[in-house]
Image: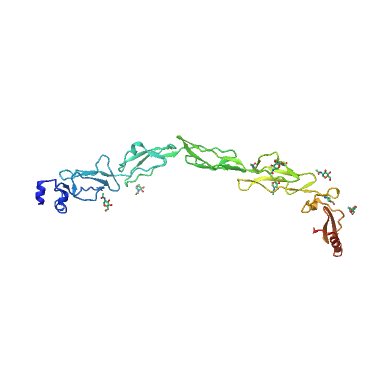
Amino acid sequence: MVLVAAVVSPGHCHPLWLLGFVVLLLPGACGLCGALPSLSHAIPADTNRTEGFPINTQVTYRCLDGFVKIPGKSDTVECLSNSQWSNMEEFCGRSCLAPPRLKSAVLSDEDLRKNYYPVGTTVSYVCRPAYEKTELSPVITCLENLTWMEAPEFCLGKSCGVPKSPEHGRPVDTTNNRFGAKVYILCDDGYQVSGQPFIQCLLNGDQVEWSKLPICQLITCSPPPNITNGMHNGSNVEIFGYNSSVTYKCDHNFSLTGEASIQCTTKDNINGVWNGSAPECKVIITQDKPTIVPPEGAEVAGSSSGSVLNTTGNSTAPEGKGLGMCIDIGIGTSIGIVVLGAVAAIIPLAILKKNRMKVGAS
Ligand SMILES: *[C@@H]1O[C@H](CO)[C@@H](O)[C@H](O)[C@H]1NC(C)=O
Ligand SMILES: *[C@@H]1O[C@H](CO)[C@@H](O)[C@H](O)[C@H]1NC(C)=O
Ligand SMILES: *[C@@H]1O[C@H](CO)[C@@H](O)[C@H](O)[C@H]1NC(C)=O
Ligand SMILES: *[C@@H]1O[C@H](CO)[C@@H](O)[C@H](O)[C@H]1NC(C)=O
Ligand SMILES: *[C@@H]1O[C@H](CO)[C@@H](O)[C@H](O)[C@H]1NC(C)=O
Ligand SMILES: *[C@@H]1O[C@H](CO)[C@@H](O)[C@H](O)[C@H]1NC(C)=O
Ligand SMILES: *[C@@H]1O[C@H](CO)[C@@H](O)[C@H](O)[C@H]1NC(C)=O
Ligand SMILES: *[C@@H]1O[C@H](CO)[C@@H](O)[C@H](O)[C@H]1NC(C)=O
Ligand SMILES: *[C@@H]1O[C@H](CO)[C@@H](O)[C@H](O)[C@H]1NC(C)=O
């Protein structure tokens, strides 16, 4: 039966008709191609079948790793009407993979179109716009082990030149001024950088240039505080820059306590702060001018009272002995009593009781 079928209609057997039996016994008969041709550097890519291919079937091969299709050679076989596979020669050659992409250069147009790079092939590069040629040849070769040789620095970033200094500042490190370089700007003492604290060498068109310089801004303080019964000499000033100072002065008949001057300084190199608080102006009371009576609640005590207020009477206390007491009678009047020994201590006590006075030891 098999024989008859083969004789009667060679090349026209129905595959299903012969399934399981003819195909296995007589591959190639009845219009089927047998085992696929085997290649040493390629394997069939689009089928898992090993034999029994109908006429006109096309099978495409792919190269094994390390091999690449040689341009112009066919990678496909076809089952011909005589149940034979078409001829196919080795189409895979040892080849490097695509040449590496470089930051500084692109593959020349001509080499870009290739995809087969057998050992010994050279490809050339062209510098990218931000880069310029060095004296090194812009060429790399496919090595014996099918890797590309390391690309030397045949393209170098274009130079932006020595960076300028902003007013009141300077670039920190100017050793690298080629494309991509980042240079920090340091502002002078008392100035703060506004915006990005660095410049970069960037591409503009096909040239490189530094990005915009930041501005070094004077660090300023808020206006100095106003004080009662006094003034400062900065009332006409609008901006109080770093290092500037104002000096306070008290009105007539008031005395100044604290530092007369404050200076604008900084702790964080960003914000200006005054180096201290403003002084205070206090009423001066003198015994010689009894007509002056300080308003209710005026401050007469404190550290300044010793120098501002003079006591009446003469001090007769021997040095180093006895107890000095200062007793305020009423407002603004003081009596200094020096008590010698324990005996005299009764006197102030008596006065104290009588006048319900405040006693302060000095
Ligand atoms: C071949 O067989 C594998 C698994 O055995 C399967 O994943 C793949 O899709 C098959 N390929 C074809 C072309 O039939
Ligand atoms: C290929 O050969 C080169 C030069 O002999 C060598 O430097 C490189 O490391 C080799 N690469 C690999 C992947 O073996
Ligand atoms: C602030 O004073 C210091 C010390 O006198 C001086 O070195 C610095 O240049 C001054 N800075 C400004 C911004 O005036
Ligand atoms: C201080 O007083 C002046 C004038 O009286 C005023 O212009 C200024 O704003 C005051 N300053 C503050 C910090 O209050
Ligand atoms: C205020 O006076 C002091 C001392 O004369 C001086 O150093 C300072 O610059 C003055 N400040 C202003 C804002 O004029
Ligand atoms: C200061 O005190 C004197 C004497 O008591 C007085 O004549 C003068 O008017 C006072 N000055 C002011 C600004 O109050
Ligand atoms: C603040 O600066 C002024 C002016 O330089 C100076 O006289 C004063 O002593 C300083 N105050 C403090 C608290 O350092
Ligand atoms: C207080 O009196 C002494 C002498 O008794 C004098 O030297 C001093 O100037 C006086 N102080 C005041 C603030 O009047
Ligand atoms: C203080 O004592 C001296 C003599 O020791 C005397 O001349 C003077 O008048 C006295 N002053 C008062 C205010 O009592």
**Residue 97 placement, left or right of 312:** left
Task: In this rendered view, identify the residue nearer to me: 67 or 269.
Answer: 269
**Residue 44 placement, left or right of 259:** left
Q: Residue farthest to the bottom?
A: 343
* Quadrant assignment for ligand 4: top right
Q: Horizontal and vertical percent for residue 152? A: 40, 42
Q: Horizontal and vertical percent for residue 20? A: 16, 54
Q: Quadrant of the C terminus?
A: bottom right
Task: In this rendered view, identify the residue nearer to me: 274 or 52.
Answer: 52
Q: Horizontal and vertical percent for residue 221? A: 65, 44
Residue in view at x 86 percent, y 64 percent: 346
Q: How is the image coloured?
A: rainbow
Task: In this rendered view, identify the residue nearer to me: 117 or 198.
Answer: 198
Task: In this rendered view, identify the residue nearer to me: 27 or 119.
Answer: 27
Quadrant of the image occupied by residue 232: top right
**Residue 174 placement, left or right of 324:** left
Q: Is residue 135 above or below residue 31?
A: above
Quadrant of the image occupied by residue 226: top right
Q: Horizontal and vertical percent for residue 63? A: 27, 46
Residue in view at x 27 percent, y 46 percent: 62
The number of numbered discs placed on residues in the rendered structure image is 0
Residue in view at x 59 percent, y 40 percent: 216
**Residue 140 placement, left or right of 316:** left
